[in-house]
Amino acid sequence: MVAGLILTVYGEESSLAIEALESLFRTQDYPIQLVIVATNVTEAAVNRLKKHSQTKYYRLLTFAGKKSLTFCLNRGILYYLENFPTINYIGWIHPDMEFSKPYIATLIKRLEKDPSIGKISPNNSRDGWQEERQANEQCWIIPRRVFHEVGLFDENFSIGYEDWDLNRRVINAGYRCIVTPDAEVYHAGMVTRARENTTSREVMEKNAHYYMTKWGDTNAPC
């Protein structure tokens, strides 16, 4: 079995992304394929990622212009859904994550034992230890079949609220979205948004309005 991981890179994050990848590879405990989906990147940044891929194999997809992170994430998911029918688990990692402990095998083991889980994430060590709970966290892994049932991320959200929206669809389909302390990563959070201003106040207000129109409230589902 192999897990398909997606790393989204926006703007001048190539050095940060390579640091995240090195920590991932050092702690890897499960066979993976990796696709990096990059947008709004300079030629120098692309070259850094290409050079790194010569020593650590992965596929690099680049999109010109300022594509949204939601768009990039969906391109990564489709990469696996359309080309790798045997990959049953798809996960998302960020450039501002540090992987000091193995986490992939633990999450997949839970998914294999409990089909009621539609989305599972490790605990974020930034926030300290917390009990297992229904909640929203990044570095998630989602079974392939769940995407087939509920669809991809809604690209009407540039970034922000798109995860709440997917969580609602996952929950409405009868699954749970959980965060477990059995696995842990460090996720600084909001680095891309702060550095690249991907979610200005105007963008967030637009996302909130669309979410309200779609669901009738602006509440987190979990």
Image (cartoon, rainbow, N blue to C red):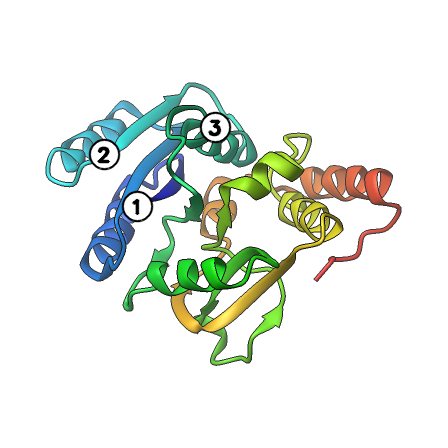
| Dot 1: element | helix
| Dot 3: element | helix
Counting residues from the N terminus, which is met first, the one under dot 1 or under dot 2?
1
Does the CB distance between marks 1 and 2 fall below 8 Å?
yes
Observer able to see residue 197: no
Q: Is the residue 48 above or below the residue 174 in the image? A: above
Residue at numbered disc 3: 78
In the image, which disc is placed on residue 49? 2
Q: Amino acid at mark 1?
A: Ala
Observer able to see residue 27: yes
Q: Mark 3 vs mark 1: give the one in front.
A: 3
Q: Is residue 146 left or right of residue 156?
A: left
Q: Nearer the viewer, residue 10 or 141?
A: 141
Q: Is residue 143 left or right of residue 204?
A: left
Q: Amino acid at mark 2?
A: Leu
Q: Position of residue 163 (x, y in %)?
A: 62, 48
Counting residues from the N terminus, which is met first, the one under dot 3 or under dot 2?
2
| Quadrant of the drawing holding the C terminus | bottom right
Q: Amino acid at mark 3?
A: Leu
Residue at numbered disc 1: 17
In the image, what residue occupies the spot 42% across and 62% down? 107
| Dot 2: element | helix
Neighbour class for label 3 at 10 Å: few (<14), some, many (≥20)?
some
Q: Is the residue 23 above or below the residue 21 in the image? A: below
Does the CB distance between marks 3 and 1 fall below 8 Å?
no
Q: Position of residue 98 (x, y in %)?
A: 32, 61
